[in-house]
Amino acid sequence: MHRMLFCTLLLACNGSGGDDTQNGGDDDDDAGCSVTEANDLDDLTSELAGIDHECEDQPYYMPDIPTATTWYIGELIIDDCGDVSGTEIAYLYPNPKWVELDGYECVVTWNITGSLRDPFNTGDYGLDLEANVDGFNSTCPEDVNGNTFYSGFEFLELDYDVVQDGQGGISVLFVGGQRAGEEMATGQDNPNHVTYRTSTPQCALF
């Protein structure tokens, strides 16, 4: 399986650190760093219905090339000390050509840890994160050389700025590189939870 490198949601960026202004990063450890707000946010996987093969509708799509439409969804928990944990999951939907070559619908899961910070460029808060691939909960096939969709992306440092719309909705922005400040994903948040889905699909070529 030959892979073309492409820009994914999981961009390797240097975290800028910074003080936590969202949930009181200086809380005493005796407070227990609890999660007090209910996780009542929408399940964004339901939004993938109907857009799961969107790359196949793009003008540059070539049906003879094995391709997967890839969407990323993040689900994060933020405790009252500003510590972050959760997952980012890539959902891959194969075109008919990749199916012919034994491709199938699959997921890649990264476990997320990190902390809140001040926004680096713009926004209401930032997320300074590390991502480690979870091979047990990743289902995508290997190629004949033992490479996977996530080969080379097993560990990543992530840096996002988050803009709140005042009604529970958020935009997640790129921080580094040429796309700094551009919207990467949209979603929802409350004081202890964040969920987001990429705004446009990534089209992986195999």
Image (cartoon, rainbow, N blue to C red):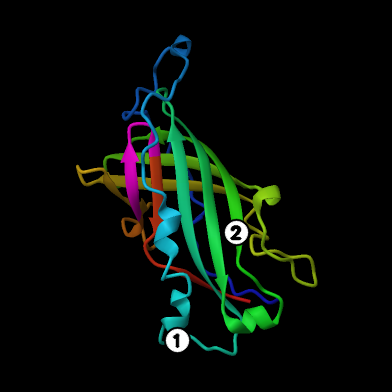
User: Which image quarter: residue 164?
Assistant: top left
Q: Kindly identify the residue that appears in the image at 42 percent across and 70 percent down.
A: 51
- In the image, taking residue 130 as reference, residue 149 lies left or right, namely right
Q: Which mark is residue 107?
A: 2
Given the current orientation, which residue lies at the most extreme left position? 166
Query: Where residue 127 sits in the image (x, y, percent)?
Result: 41, 40
Q: Which residues are magenta?
A: 186-193
- For label 2, the SS is strand
Q: Kindly identify the residue that appears in the image at 47 percent across and 81 percent down.
A: 56
Which of the marked residues, 2 or 1, is nearer the chain's N terminus?
A: 1
Identify the main secondary structure in magenta.
Answer: strand
Q: Is residue 162 visible?
A: yes
* Magenta span contains residue 189: yes
Query: Where residue 206 sits in the image (x, y, percent)?
Result: 63, 76
The answer to whether residue 40 is above or below residue 105 is above
Q: Which residue is mark 1?
A: 60
Q: CA distance from mark 2 to mark 1?
A: 24 Å
* Magenta span contains residue 122: no
Q: Amino acid at mark 2?
A: Val
- In the image, taking residue 28 as reference, residue 166 lies left or right, namely left
- For label 1, the SS is loop
Q: Which mark is residue 4?
A: none
